[in-house]
């Protein structure tokens, strides 16, 4: 199975497969029924510190990505669980 990214605000589709939300907080305006998630993986979201540093600044995206990947490297067991599902 392929892994694909999709916004939680987009409707769930029949071809979505196993749906995982990766975010610290539940998205506003989206009910749990409407989200149609299989799992909420808060622990894989970027840290609060990293999100505050990034501050949605496009000029910082490349560095944000590198820092986030370093964070994810410390959560390899959890990522392996999702890889087995995918």
Image (cartoon, helix red, strand yellow):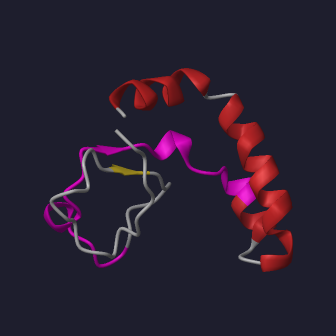
Q: Residue 80 placed where, x, y %?
A: 50, 24
- Splitting the image into 4 quarters, where does residue 65 fall? bottom right
Q: Is residue 30 magenta?
A: yes
Q: Residue 53 placed where, x, y %?
A: 81, 64
- Splitting the image into 4 quarters, where does residue 33 fall? bottom left
Picture residue at 72% right of the left edge, 43% below the top: 69
Position of residue 28 relative to residue 41, above or below, is below
Picture residue at 42% right of the left edge, 43% below the top: 41
Picture residue at 77% right of the left edge, 38% below the top: 70
- Splitting the image into 4 quarters, where does residue 36 fall? bottom left
The residue most toward the front is: 1
The quadrant of the picture occupied by the N terminus is top left
Q: Nearer the viewer, residue 8 or 6?
A: 6
Residue 78 horizontal side relative to residue 60, left or right: left
Q: Which span is picked out in magenta? A: 28-50
Q: Nearer the viewer, residue 28 or 34?
A: 34
Residue 10 horizontal side relative to residue 2, left or right: left
Q: Is residue 41 magenta?
A: yes
């Amino acid at each position: 199975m392929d892994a694909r990214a999709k916004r939680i605000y987009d409707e769930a589709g029949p071809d979505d497969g196993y749906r995982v939300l990766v975010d610290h907080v539940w998205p506003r305006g989206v009910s749990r029924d409407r989200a149609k998630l299989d799992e909420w993986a808060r622990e894989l979201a970027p840290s609060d510190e990293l999100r505050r540093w990034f501050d949605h600044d496009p000029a910082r995206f490349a560095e944000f990505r590198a820092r986030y990947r370093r964070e994810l490297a410390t959560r390899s067991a959890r990522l392996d669980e999702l890889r087995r599902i995918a």
